[in-house]
Image: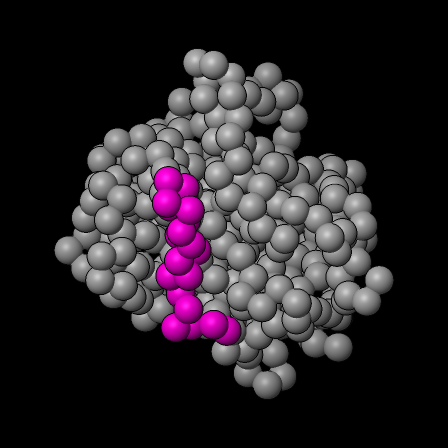
Amino acid sequence: MQRLYYKKDNFGFLPTDGTYRLYSYTANDKTPTSVFESHDPFALRDIAADGHHVVFTMANNPDNDLDFGEGVYLSDTQTDTLTNLTDARPTWTFINAKFSPNSDKLLLIGHTDEFDVNTHNYVYGITLATGEFTDYTSELDEEAHEALFSDFPQNLDAEDAFWVTNEQFVFRTSWQGHSRFYLNQNGQNQRFFDEHARITNWAVANNQQLIVTYSTPTVPVKLATLAFDSTLTDLYNPNATFDASHEYVEPETFWYNASDGTEIEGWLYPPLAPTEKNPIVIDIHGGPHQAWTENFFFDIQLYANNGFGMLLLNLVAARLTANPFAKQSSATIVSKITLI
C-alpha cells in the first residue's frame, strides 16, 4: 500500500482498484440499475423531486491524502452528466447537501478549511440556475453541525438542516453543551430553541413544527414535537418504567476563568447521597473537535448513584484543591478549581 489511509472502519482494507456505484431501484419489477460509478468513494446526500438528479459529496483531489477538500457534485442520471457545483471553492469541505422542495436550490453544510479540521461548519446555499452562492449562518459564529459528545445515544444521523418550504429552512447548531435551533425566513435567522437539552434526532413534520428526540442530564430520551414558537411537547417516553424506579442526579453548570482569562464551562454532578468526604472523578473527553453536552450519561449517573462526584469540563485538565460537595454554590466550587 502506498496511501496514507489504508483501511476504513466497517470497510476493511481500502482498495486501490475498486469501483463505487450508485443504483436506482424500481420497486415494481425489482430491478436495480447502475446510474453512476466512480473509482473514488462518494457519499449520496439527496435526490431531487424529479428522481433523476442526485447530489453527493466527493473528494476534489482523491489522489492526495493530505487534501481534505470535499466538493458537492450534481449528477443527471438521464444524460449521464456530472457537475462540480463548488469548483470555485476547491479547498472547502462540504459534508451535506439538501434539495429544496421544488429542487431549484441546495442547502449545504461545510467549512472553508481556514483552520484545517478545526474550522466551524456553517449553512450555505446554491441557486442551481445561476450558481449564486449564499452564506446563511457564519455571522452567528455557531457550529452548524452536531459537535456534541456522548457515548449513550447511538446511531444518530448527520442532518443539520432541513427545508420547510421553498423559502424557509431550519438548522441546528451546537452551543455551550446544548442544541440551538433556528428558522431562516425572509433572509433572517430566528432562534426558537435554546434550552439545556440536546436534540439527538429530528425532522420537519410540517411548516409549523419538528418531530424530535431529545435528551437532558436527567432524561435518557423522549419523543416530542418542537413548534417554531418554541413549544416542546412530549409524545412518548420509552424509559418511563425505568425512570420511575431510579433516581438521577441533576448537575450544576458553572463557568470559571483559566489563568489566561479563557472562560471554561463545566458541569458538577454531586453524589446522590453526599457525605463529608466523597471521591471525585474528573471525566476528560478527547478533543478539541467535540464537547461535553447536556444530555443523559448512563455511566456518570451510575457513578453518582454510588457515591462519586463527577466533574465534566470542556478542557484538557484541572485540579481540585478542596472537597466541593459540602453544600457549596458553584461560585465556591469554581474558586477551588485551578488549571494544571
Q: Which colour scheme appears in the figure?
A: one colour
Marker count (numbered): 0
Q: Report which quarter residue 264 is drawn in.
A: bottom right
| 180 on left or right of 330 | left
Q: What residue is rendered at 15% in x and 55% in y? A: 186
- Give x and y (percent) for residue 306: 78, 38
- Give x and y (percent) for residue 324: 69, 59
Q: Is residue 77 magenta?
A: yes
Range drawn in magenta: 73-91
Reply above or below: 221 against 320. Answer: above
Q: Given the current orientation, which residue lies at the most extreme top position? A: 28
Reply above or below: 146 against 244. Answer: below
Q: What residue is rendered at 81% in x and 67% in y? A: 2
Q: What residue is rendered at 84% in x and 62% in y? A: 1
Residue placed most toward the observer, 130 or 327:
130
- Give x and y (percent) for residue 5: 75, 61
| Residue 126 seen anywhere in this rendered image of the structure | yes
Q: Given the current orientation, which residue lies at the most extreme front position? A: 79
**Which quarter shows the C terminus?**
bottom right
Q: Given the current orientation, which residue lies at the most extreme left position? A: 186
- Give x and y (percent) for residue 73: 43, 55
Q: Given the current orientation, which residue lies at the most extreme right position? A: 1
Residue placed most toward the observer, 315 or 186:
186
Reply above or below: 23 against 86. Answer: above
| 237 on left or right of 225 | right
Q: What residue is rendered at 57% in x and 74% in y? A: 116
| 11 on left or right of 171 | right
| Residue 294 seen anywhere in this rendered image of the structure | no
Residue placed most toward the observer, 340 or 48:
48
Q: Is residue 112 magenta?
A: no
